[in-house]
Image: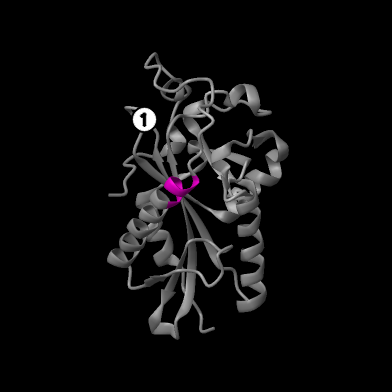
């Protein structure tokens, strides 16, 4: 079930200030299980696909290139025209408790939404390539399932359109970047699989998941 049920832009500093639960620690466990995270992310992709297909006339397909966002939303009534793309992000485990210390600008740990920076840049590239290929902008929506252990806002799902995220990325630059320490769990058969370069957005910069379907239905695909 994907839900938010409130507008995250109205979250206050008080609501985002961590209390005394002490669930999240200001130190890393240095454990980033790549295979486990991939499995849970795939489950989220399936949930989003069902959500889109159950509430729009469109169908969802996997991308033709692994570097592209997770889901292609297709209008089969228009010669299988590409309506938009969706990328799924699952945030589990502890909040980034050292956000204020490690980032170049203040963000509360509870509000941070992380994305691998190389992947974010690949989405920017994908949108440009779509424009060159189709002659029109293909919207890309990034969806975050916020499965942090926070008792109040844990479990919510939010999204934002890529062009809005790009504006934030261009405005804030390196202030939102953080490169974490690589650990043994980042490696599979001696090859580094885990991505350590991270970029951070805020819950307050996103929209509730309830607005995603209406946004998609506003899009009118042309014949490709």
Q: Residue at x 64, y 33 (%)?
A: 181
Residue 137 spot, x, y in % from top left: 59, 68
Q: Residue at x 36, y 54 (%)?
A: 43
Out of 90 and 18, give the one closest to the viewer. 90
**Helix, strand or loop status at disc 1:** loop
67 up-or-down from 75: above or below: above
Q: Which residues are magenta?
A: 34-38
84 up-or-down from 94: above or below: below
Which color scheme did the rendering employ for the protein? one colour
Out of 186 and 136, give the one closest to the viewer. 186
| Residue 51: quadrant of the picture | bottom left
Q: Residue at x 44, y 46 (%)?
A: 37
Q: What is the residue that sits farthest to the front in this orientation?
A: 189
Q: Quadrant of the C terminus?
A: bottom right
Out of 218 and 17, give the one closest to the viewer. 17
Q: Residue at x 40, y 33 (%)?
A: 148
181 left or right of 69?
A: right
| Residue 74: quadrant of the picture | bottom left
Q: Residues within 10 Å of mark 1 (few under 14, many from 20)?
A: some
Residue 153 spot, x, y in % from top left: 36, 32
Circle count: 1
Question: Would you say the magenta stretch is mainly helix, strand or loop?
Answer: helix
60 up-or-down from 114: above or below: below
Q: Which residue is mark 1?
A: 149
As for residue 9 lying within the magenta part, the answer is no
Residue 2 spot, x, y in % from top left: 32, 49
132 up-or-down from 13: above or below: below
Residue 86 spot, x, y in % from top left: 47, 60
């Amino acid at each position: 079930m994907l839900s938010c049920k409130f507008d995250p832009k109205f979250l206050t500093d008080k609501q985002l200030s961590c209390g005394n639960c002490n669930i999240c620690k200001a130190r890393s466990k240095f454990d980033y299980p790549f295979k486990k995270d991939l499995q849970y992310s795939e489950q989220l992709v399936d949930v989003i696909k069902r959500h889109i297909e159950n509430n729009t006339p469109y169908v969802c397909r996997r991308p033709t290139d692994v570097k592209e966002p997770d889901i292609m939303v297709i209008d089969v009534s228009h010669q299988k025209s590409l309506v938009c793309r969706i990328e799924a992000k699952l945030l589990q485990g502890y909040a980034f408790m050292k956000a204020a210390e490690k980032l170049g600008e203040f963000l509360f740990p509870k509000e941070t939404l992380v994305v691998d920076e190389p992947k974010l840049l690949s989405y920017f590239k994908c949108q440009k390539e779509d424009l060159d290929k189709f002659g029109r902008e293909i919207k890309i929506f990034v969806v975050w399932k916020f499965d942090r252990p926070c008792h109040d806002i844990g479990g919510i799902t939010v999204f934002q359109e890529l062009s809005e995220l790009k504006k934030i990325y261009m405005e804030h630059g390196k202030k939102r970047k953080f490169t974490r320490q690589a650990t043994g769990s980042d490696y599979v058969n001696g090859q580094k699989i885990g991505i350590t370069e991270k970029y951070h957005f805020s819950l307050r910069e996103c929209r509730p998941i309830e607005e995603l379907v209406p946004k998609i239905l506003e899009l009118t695909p042309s014949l490709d």
